[in-house]
Every structure is written in structure tokens, then in C-alpha cells.
Image (cartoon, rainbow, N blue to C red):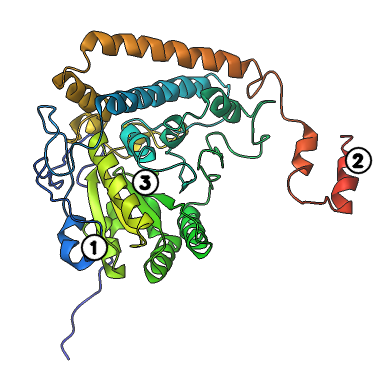
Amino acid sequence: MADAGMLRFHVPEPEVRPGGTPDFSNVTIPKAGSVPRPEIDVDPRTIRDMAFSIIRVLNRAGEAVGPWAGLLTDDELLEGLRNMMTLRTFDARMQMAQRQGKTSFYMQHLGEEAVSSAFRKALKPGDMNFPTYRQAGLLIADGYPMVTMMNQIYSNEADPLKGRQLPIMYSSKEHGFFSISGNLATQYIQAVGWAMASAISNDSRIAAAWIGDGSTAESDFHSALVFASTYKAPVILNVVNNQWAISTFQGIARGGSGTFAARGLGFGIPALRVDGNDYLAVHAVAKWAAERARANLGPTLIEYVTYRAGAHSSSDDPSAYRPKAESDAWPLGDPIIRLKNHLIHKKAWSEDRHTQAEAEILETVIAAQKEAEGHGTLHAGGKPSTRDMFEGVYAEMPAHLRRQRQQAGV
């Protein structure tokens, strides 16, 4: 047998490093409206190519075109625009608050606002999301109070989670927002299990799992797909591909699959890719997947192609691993600007009204921030009671915890 020579270890490399010219030539963008909309009971084997395309509704002229268009009224689109604008303004104020030392940590959604905001509108009350730390739009689009979100970020006396969670790790059963876990990918198997339980109990509620591109390398992701496909769980499996994990490009986690959506094909799960910066497309695809789940047709895997315009978190410096101008070069644009232009094209909006809305939203967010800060911040004002750490763990408090509470004087 001939000697094949020395083995070489392969490490994927990003297209460009800091200081280089941004390059998205590898992102193939189909024409808006060109991807067909199959029936919800389609055989997954017949739509394999959809795992390698991108569903788009809004074209460059701001028009909504193709078979995925026409599901939302002007009023619904205007509400979506305001929700995204609110999330962006909320982000900016909370990022500033972190820099001022009012909270220890924050994570922005800059450039990804359409993904969670539009998705929430495709669900029904009682459905449960198992989110990551970048889906606060699910709460804002569902009317969750910003003051309550800020109280949790500040870990103050009015924090609904009593200081037990890191900032931005919200939780609200009433709004279908399962407690965020800092251990990435765990929420994927939790969502599938919750969906299976809903089916076992003959309920009508579905679940939605959320994960980032980097965390798809975790074993929990693959375990969730096994159970979802085997038991046809009523769950939507969301993968937010924002091009970057904490500091590594998507190629590290994607491997040789070509796309993250393609991971679903080996499990017989319908897999779609959607323009994550297109509010109309995100909503339409989410609605399609939700209808499949409610019709007992099983799970759908959706990859949202978007871009993390900001840092991974307030403790991250993206200039260390990607070009500073890369965000500006992202070919799918800004989700807020794209929806704004669409509404202006429809004569349902204008630049003046948009400017006015920006001012109104900023005023509302600042008022909420002042109210929340009245309850305390990281280094000032009211804090959760020490007594709270002993509550809510056991139905009946064990003797050793009662002794510890007494020793703490609470």
C-alpha cells in the first residue's frame, strides 16, 4: 500500500480578517419572491432544495412580491415596525446604562430585530418559546412591560426574578417566554420535550426552540432533532444564523453541511432558510411552520439568515475578529429600514412620521427607564431581599434552609 504522506489537520478560515475588505460573495441571495410556498403537508423529501435557498418577500424597491407575501395588513406591519424600533431604542438605552455602571452586563439585538418580533406574531397565546439571550423581541412584540424588563436587568427590588438571573435572562410564563438558560443549546431539548408533553396531554399549544449558529455544534441540538423527528413533536426549531458565534465565524459550527438548515434533512425534517432581515418573510415562514405543528405534521427547522451588527455582548470587542465595516457591507440590509421603505412605498408611512415615531418611542423608553431606576440599579437603590434566595425552591422549605434563613436574620 502506497504511503499517503503526513496527515494534515484542517481548521476552517473566515473569508476575511480584521483590517481586510468585507466579503459576502459566498452568500447567494435569490430574487425576492422566487422561492415557492409549498403546502403545509408537503413531503419533506420534495423540498430539500429549500434548505439551500433563502425565502424573501421584500425586493430592493420595497415591494412585497411572491407567494409568501400578502399575509399582513398595513396596521399589522406598522405595529411590527414600532416593535422593532422600540427594541432598538431599548437596546441603546440599556447598553448605555451598562456603560454607566447601572448593570453588570447587556446583550444587544442590533440588526436582528425582525427575527423575534415577526416570529411572535405568528404564534398564539399559550404557545411557549424557549429562547436564547437575543430574542427580547418576543416579549416586546407581545406587550411585556419594558419597566419589568429593565427591573430584571438592574436586579433591583422590583426584579420579578429576585436577582436570581443574569441581566437580560428574562422569564415570563404568561407571555410564553421560558426562563433563559446560560448553558447554550439546553433550550432546544427542553422545547422538544415541552412540545411532546403538549401532544401527550392532547393540548393545542405548540413550542418554539431557539438557538444561535455557534451552539448548533452542541450535542443537545442533535438530540433535539432526533426526538422531534421521531415523535413528530409540534415544535418549530429556529436557528438564528447571524454569521458569528461569540468570536468565531459560522464555518466552525456549520462544518461541511453547507447551511444550518441542511442539518434537518438527515432527520427527515422540512428545512427552510429565510431572509432574517425581512419582517414579512420571517412572519410568513413562521406562520407556515406553526400551521404544520398545529396540524400534527411535526417539526420544521428554520434558519434565519441575518447579521449581528453589534458586539456579542457588552464584554465583547468584535474589532478583534472581524472588519469594522463588515456590518455596513451585509447584503440583506437593515430590517427596520427595509420595512419602513416598504410602508412608504405603500403610502402607509412617511419619513416625517418615522422621525416622529422615533422621538415618541425614545420618550417612552426613557420614561420606563426612569421608573425602573427609581426601584434601584446595580450600585444604588433598592435590592431584592436576602430572604428571596430561600423562597420558591421547595414547596415546603427543608429544615436546613430554615436554619440558614434564621442565621441570615431574614
Q: Secondary structure at mark 1?
A: loop
Give percent across and percent down for residue 7: 25, 73
Three-letter code, disc 2? Gln
The answer to whether residue 149 is left or right of residue 225 is right
The residue at 16%/65% (across/down) is 46
Crowding near pointer 1: few (<14 within 10 Å), some, many (20+)?
few
Disc 3 secondary structure class:
loop
User: For mark 2, what is the residue?
Assistant: 406
Secondary element type, mark 2? helix
Choose the circle earlier in sequence order: 3 or 2: 3
Tell which circle, 3 or 1, labels the residue nearer the N-terminal end.
Answer: 3
Which residue corresponds to mark 3? 245
Side of 371 where 36 appears, left or right: left
Name the residue nearer the viewer: 139 or 187.
139
Contact (Cβ within 8 Å) of mark 3 with mark 1: no
The crowding category of the residue bearing disc 2, from other C-alpha atoms within 10 Å (few below 14, some 14 to 19, many at least 20), is: few
Q: Is residue 12 left or right of residue 92?
A: left
The foreground one among 180 and 75 is 75
Which residue is rendered at x = 23% and y = 75% of the image? 6
Residue at 66% x, 19% y is 375
Q: Please name the residue that numbered disc 1 is placed on.
A: 256
